[in-house]
Image (spheres, grey):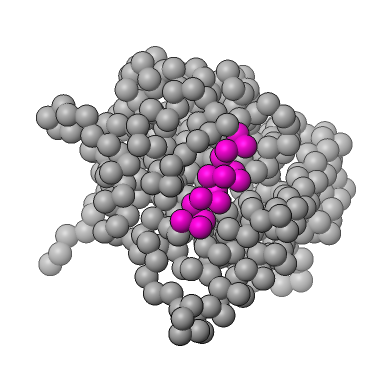
Amino acid sequence: MARINDNYLKLKAGYLFPEIGRRVKAFAQANPAAKIIRLGIGDVTQPLPPALLKAFHQAVDDLAGKESFMGYGPEQGYEFLIDTLIEKSYRPLGVDLKTSEVFISDGSKCDCANILDIFALDNTVAICDPVYPVYNDTNVMIGRTGEADEQGYYQGMVYLPCTEENGFTPAIPTEKMDIVYLCYPNNPTGAVASREDLKKWVDYALANDTIILFDAAYEAFITEPGIPHSIYEIEGAKRCAIEFRSFSKTAGFTGVRCALTVVPEEVMARTADGEVYSLNKLWNRRQSTKFNGVSYPVQKAAAAVYSDEGWPQVKQIIDYYMENARLIREGLQKAGMTVYGGVNAPYIWLKTPTGLSSWQFFDQLLTECHVVGTPGSGFGPSGEGFFRLSAFGDRVQVIEAIGRIQSKLA
Ligand code: MLT
């Protein structure tokens, strides 16, 4: 009989969002009249804008023509999309990238997980707490950790607490780490990193030969000037950082699927023999073997995000979600709650009312207001006593949800 990967058995409960889904389903079945409003998982609600749809449709039509038909595309992504990203999204930040440094994929979640393929198991890894659960769970799955303790910390991982006291900004580790995950704007806390914050991380990484895995999936939601959108805005970052970006939230692609990972040619790690080796080469090898690229129509639609017609339409939807964020933030403050985030990120991180754990507040919100959010403790032990609301809902529902919270919980 074949043996399973026992590391999976170390994982605590189910993955957070399916777990929430199960609880909400049970509540909905028991209360069929309840009009449930979902502000839990960060899933977009607004349709794709016209310029993207036009490009999508045209590309599908290309597949109908003998001359314009496309089969396998490059595993790394089509140059038309990569070069558009370099010109329209990175160059305005003062960041120069080569075509060979950008890899198109079907999602940042997958890439954040798959990147572990190219690193040895004995690397030391640090993640924030609370954190996007994928970083933690994929390290457990691949076998880098021991068992979890009663708090939920896995043996062998280093956790960097992000608390109210430190402004949800993790302290730079005192020990030398091989790999550090950072996510800015942050999921789940909504915190951002200033240029000075990121410079400290890059300096630490360069001094300690650390690789930073930088998740910038929410960069398009930054509203305040001066906050870096890419880690490569910091000098030296190309020698120590891999960056993940996504079309999911930026352009409503959660169902369409498209993302990018930047692996600069300068970023290096070492072989077992101590030789310096290019991570770009390894990632390219990994992708060419295990991935066949994102479909042509999807990449055409993604490129249209940065067209003269597309960007204003995409930006309008981003602004719509950020107006939701403002309504949630201010509405909760009026209800007497302490809230963070929601200014440069589509997530609002609120403190649960005194005495309530994250899951108790989840139950209260669901049963009394019929509103679904995400318990902070689901993102890690330091998330206990906090709760996340997503700003990706429909405006009418967001207003309704805040009204219910104000009338029932204030
Ligand atoms: C979230 O709600 O944290 C995200 O939607 C999850 C994801 O992007 O995979």
Q: Residue at x 84, y 41 (%)?
A: 331
Which quadrant, please, contains the C terminus? top right
Q: Is residue 296 visible?
A: yes
Camera-nearest residue between 157 and 244: 244
Q: Is residue 266 above or below residue 8?
A: above
Q: Residue at x 55, y 48 (%)?
A: 85
Camera-nearest residue between 205 and 61: 61
The image quadrant of residue 344 is: top right
Q: Is residue 402 above or below residue 194?
A: below
**How far from the left and from the top, in percent, is residue 132?**
50, 42
Tag count:
0
**Magenta residues (range):** 79-93
The dominant secondary structure in magenta is helix
**How far from the left and from the top, in percent, is residue 284?**
31, 49
Q: Is residue 60 left or right of residue 152?
A: right
Q: Is residue 123 visible?
A: no
Q: Is residue 368 left or right of residue 274?
A: right
Q: Is residue 379 above or below residue 48?
A: above
90 in magenta:
yes
Camera-nearest residue between 368 and 213: 213
Q: Is residue 406 left or right of residue 275?
A: right
367 in magenta:
no
**How far from the left and from the top, in percent, is residue 349?**
67, 37
Q: Residue at x 62, y 68 (%)?
A: 55
Q: Residue at x 60, y 34 (%)?
A: 93
**How far from the left and from the top, in percent, is residue 268?**
30, 31
